[in-house]
Image (cartoon, rainbow, N blue to C red):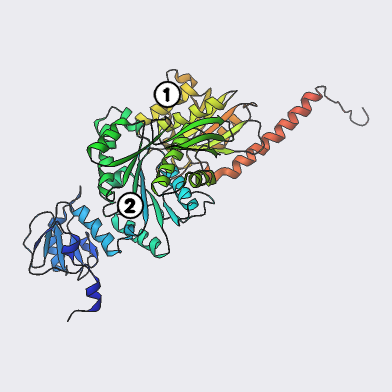
Amino acid sequence: MISVGSLCRPRLGQILSQAARFGDHDVFLTDCTDDVEKLRAGQIYVAVVRADRDGHDEITRAVRHGASAVVAERYVSVPVPLYVVQDTREALGTLHHARAGNPCQHLFTAAVAGQHGKSSTCHLATSVLHESGRAAACGTNWPADKSGWPDLGVLGRSGSSSVAQALAKWQRAGGQAAVLECDHAGLLERRWAGTKLDAAVVTDTRGWQARPHYLDQQAPQQMLERLAALLKPGRPLVLSADTPSLLADAQRLGCATVSYGLSPDADVWGKLVERDVAEQTFLLTIRDQTVPVRTATVGDWWIRHCLAAAAIGWVAGASIAEIARGLERLPRLPARLERLVCGQPFNLFLDHSRRADRFLEMLRTLRQLTSGRLWCVFALDESVPPAERSRWGRVAERFCDAAILTANRKNSTALYSIYHDVLDGYHRPARGHLIADPLKALRFVFHRASPGDTILLSSGTAHGSGPFWWPCTDQIALLLRELDETTELREVTEADPKPVIYKFPGC
């Protein structure tokens, strides 16, 4: 007897249409897993090949535990239906999304990949989609304060099942769009398999291409191929006009493209009008339409992120006016060249730069806006490779008038090893300064900075761990208050330099 529920479920052969089936019947889709330890009777076992184990070695054990079918990459004699596919990781993702109801068919989904700017672009694109009238959610590892849209969290790190379940939950809650941050490792390991995209953005990859290592130079091409495989038919790749090699690779793959950049050759391009430490204004042009956009975060790097988000909005059908309002609506992102104003006479910025090339971009931006000296207080942790630490030292010596390395509280024991690696990048190591206590380092700089100076507080910490001084915002405010009191005392002393001598009674 066939149940009504079975009639609503597709069969495995319909979902894996390219698979070679061995067995006397085609099973219905049920829960699937690639972990024998978690397998329950009646589930489908997918034999995934990983770096540390081969799931094909566990097929006999999976059948003994009650697997209703097996998906593998090669033929294995089993008493249950066997489906042979080319890549079991892709098949596992396809089954997870089919089991969740294929939520991507009901959502506008966009993915953002690359080396820098993924989180910022995700939030900007989500703001644009919200302004265009869509209920959009953002899946990234860097939350935005007071953003006003749901946060799907970090997807793709635990596999395609978490991606499918999160998107299905958001779609059932009335969601209409989702913007997802995709890391390079997740794409290579097929953790995004089964996700179908309406647009895929590749942000700045110049850091990879500038490195001499062969794998780093091949990373953008590998990422592009993975993203192209996730696109819905006819949907575009959004690429920077500054990377013509990627545009050529996209054409080789037969993908439609939308380019963005700071040159008029791009489909979506921008031109800076004015900029100061508090805000900047640029002209956003899409085809033959132009509109001014004002943002509180400054720098060419931020304009590029805005242009990538604008391209996503354009692909989604938003008008250029809605795109501009969405870009302006986003509040400052925490520690993304975030300006702190506490009444101090100098400029103070917070930034979380995990790589030296982003650190360089921030210093170049601030150097253009600084009339006085450029100070930097930075900290690195053990997750930063020694060669990358040396690049931090090289950048700090070249672009800062004074740079102070301090300690992350979590890794103070490794401070001296990190300090030596940073000094290896200095041409004149005597210019490097070390103050282990972060608060003492900040106090040292605050009391020596003059009006017109700029101070950058930057950290290179592990992905998702956050800057070491982010929880210490109250301490920073206390230090600035202490600076105000010291300044007032100094002004009173300088106004009346002659000491007043009081005689003791009876003298």
The residue tagged 2 is 156
Residue at coordinates 13% horizontally, 57% vertically from top-left?
19
- 79, above or below 317, in the image: below
Please state which amino acid type lies under the numbered disc 2. Answer: Gly
Query: In the current view of this chain or complex, which residue is farthest to the left?
Result: 77
Query: In the current view of this chain or complex, which residue is farthest to the bottom?
Result: 1
- 415, above or below 186, in the image: above
The residue tagged 1 is 394
Q: Position of residue 120 (x, y in %)?
A: 45, 43
Residue at coordinates 32% horizontally, 32% vertically from top-left?
208
Q: Is residue 500 left or right of residue 105?
A: right
| Quadrant position of the C terminus in the picture | top right
Query: In the current view of this chain or complex, which residue is farthest to the top?
Result: 428
For mark 2, give the secondary structure.
loop
Kindly identify which numbered label has been placed on residue 68.
Answer: none
Q: Position of residue 90 (x, y in %)?
A: 22, 53
| Quadrant position of the N terminus in the picture | bottom left
Please say whether residue 380 is visible from this viewpoint.
Answer: no
Q: Is residue 140 left or right of residue 350?
A: left
Image quarter of residue 238: top left
Please state which of the two labelled residues, at mark 2 or mark 1, is closer to the viewer: 2
Please say whether residue 355 is visible from this viewpoint.
Answer: yes
- 165, above or below 188, in the image: below
Q: Dot 2: within a 10 Å radius of its alpha carbon, few (fewer than 14), some, or many (20 or more) residues?
A: many
Query: In the current view of this chain or complex, which residue is farthest to the front?
Result: 288
Q: Position of residue 469 (x, y in %)?
A: 52, 41
Image quarter of residue 340: top right
Alpha-carbon distance for marks 2 and 1?
A: 35 Å
Q: Is residue 284 left or right of residue 203?
A: right
- In the foreground, 195 or 116: 195
Please state which amino acid type lies under the numbered disc 1. Answer: Arg
Mark 2 near mark 1, Cβ–Cβ under 8 Å?
no
